[in-house]
Amino acid sequence: MKLWGDRFGKESSEEAFQFSASLPFDRRLWKHDIRGSVAHAGMLGKCGIIPQAEAEQIIAGLKQIETDIQTALDRNEDPFDPQSEDIHTEIERKLTEKIGEVAGRLHTARSRNDQVALDLRLYLRDACDEIGKSLIRLQEALIAQAESHLKTETILPGYTHRQHAQPVLLSHHLLAYFWKFQRDRDRVCDCRRRINVSPLGAAALAGTSYPIDPALTAAELEFPCAFDNSMDAVSDRDFAVEFLAVAATCMSHLSSLAGELVLWSSAEFGFVILDDAWCTGSSIMPQKRNPDIAELVNGKAGRVLGHLVGLVSLLKGLPLTYNRDLQEDKEAVFDSHNTLCGSLGVMAGMLQNAAFQSGQMLEAVKASPFLAATEVADYLAKKRVPFRQAHSLTAKIVRSCEEKKKSLADLSLEEWKKFSPLFDADIEELLEVGAVVKAKASPGGTAPQEVTKAIMKAKQVMQAPREG
Ligand code: ARG
C-alpha cells in the first residue's frame, strides 16, 4: 500500500522503494505514531470535521492495533509489513484492514510532514526522560564511591597536563564528574522544553482549510503549547540538533571518565580494579583482563559526535519546508539515543563495582617527589615573601632536590634553612600528604571538610525538581 500511488502511471522501481523506505528504522516510532493519531482523530471528532462516531471508531481501531503490535512484539513476531514505506503508512494500512473505509478519514487535515515531526518530538521527549533517569543512576554511583572514599580519605595525585600536580581526594576527583553529569541533566531538561512543542496541525506546510484546533491536540498529547508557524513546524529540526549536541556532550564526559578508568586499570597505574563482570578476556593471552567496556564508551562518543555533525550538515542550506532529506534525521537520533543510554548504563554498573586501590594511589603520591611544592611556596608567601619570589625560591629547591635525587620530604631542617631562614620545623608536617590535602579548604576545594559539604550539596541538587 502507498499513500500516494494513484498519482503515478506505474509502480516505483524496487530499488527506489528500498532506497527510500524508512520503515526499517522508523518502526520504532509506532507507539508515538498511534498516540498522535488518536489525538488527531479525537480533535477531528470534537471539532465536527468528521462525525464523532467515526472518530471513536478510528480511535478504538488504533488502540486495538497498539495491543496487536505489542502482542506480536512480545511473541518475537514482526508485526510490520515491509511493503509499507514508513511507519505512518503501515499504521494506516493496519487501520484500514481493521475498520475499513472509515480509516481513510484519519488523514483529514494532516500530512505526514506534521505527523513525522510530531512522532519525533514525542519520541525524543520520552528519550529525554529515560536519559535523565540513567544520568541519575550514574550520579548515584559516583556519590556512593565518593562517600566511601571520603571515609577512608583516599588520596591520589591530581593531574594537569597529564603530569603530577597536587594531591587530591579521590572523592573530589569523582565528584568533578558528578557536576559534569549534573549539567548534562540540566541540558537534557533545557532541550526538552524546546522539543515539547506540538507541530500537529501544520499539515503539509501551510496549515489547513478545516477548522482544526492545534491547541486541543497539543493539550491531549501533554504539550504545553503548539507551533506558531506552520512552515517552521514541519521544517524545524533544531530540537533534534540540540538533542544530539546534548548527547555528544554527555558522551564526551563519559568518554573522559571511561578513558581514565582504562588508564587507571593499567599495570602502570593500578589505581582501579574493574570487576570481572565488567571486563573481557583475550582469545590468545590467557592472563588478560581488558577494560573493553570502558574502551567502547570512549569509541562510541565519536559516533554520536558524528551524528551531530551529520545532522547539522544535512540541515545547513536546506530550503523551507519539508524536504525528504529530513528523513535522515531519524537514524542519527535513534542511534545516539541507544548509544547514550547504553553507555550511561554500563558506566554506572562499572563504577558501582569498581575497586579503587587506595594503597596504590597513596604509593603514587608518596613516590611523587614534588607534589607539595606549591605548599612550600605558599609557606614562604604566608611569611610575607611575595609569591613570585617564593615560587622562584621553591623552584630552586626543587631543582636542587632533583640533582640530588631527593624528594622534598627528604630534606632536613638544616637543608631547608640553607635555602631560607624563614623555614621552621613546621615545614615538615606541612608537607605531609594528608596536611596538603587538608590545607585546600577554599570553597569547592579538595579538603575533606569541603568534600563533605560537596557531597551534601550534590545529594540536594539531585533531589531538586526540574522542569523540561
Ligand atoms: N518517512 C518520512 C520521514 O521520515 C515521513 C514523511 C514523509 N513525507 C513526505 N512528504 N514524503 O521524513
Image (cartoon, rainbow, N blue to C red):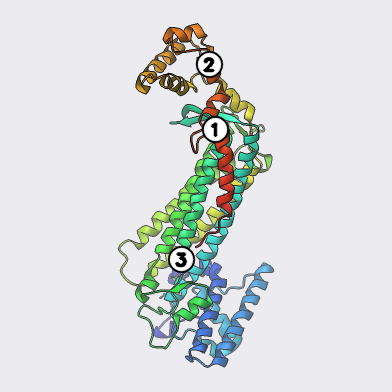
Q: What amino acid type is highlighted by mark number 2?
A: Asp
Comes first in the chain, label 3 or label 2? 3
Q: Where is residue 304 in the image (x, y as percent from the top left)?
A: 47, 52
Badge 3, how many Cα within 10 Å: few under 14, some, many 20+? many
* Residue 348 as seen in the image, left or right of residue 400: right
Q: Residue at x 65, y 76 (%)?
A: 67
Q: Is mark 3 within 8 Å of ligand 1?
A: no
Seen from the viewer's position, the closer of residues 75 and 168 is 168
Seen from the viewer's position, the closer of residues 368 and 448 is 448
* Residue 435 as seen in the image, left or right of residue 7: right
Q: What amino acid type is highlighted by mark number 3?
A: Ile
Q: Position of residue 240 (x, y in %)?
A: 44, 62
State the CA–CA distance, disc 1 to disc 2.
19 Å
* Residue 126 as seen in the image, left or right of residue 110: right
Identify the residue position indicated by label 1 in the image: 447
State the CA–CA distance, disc 3 to disc 1.
41 Å
Q: In this view, does 96 lie above or below 30?
A: below
Can residue 431 be seen here? The reply is: no
Q: What amino acid type is highlighted by mark number 1?
A: Ala
Can residue 82 be seen here? The reply is: yes
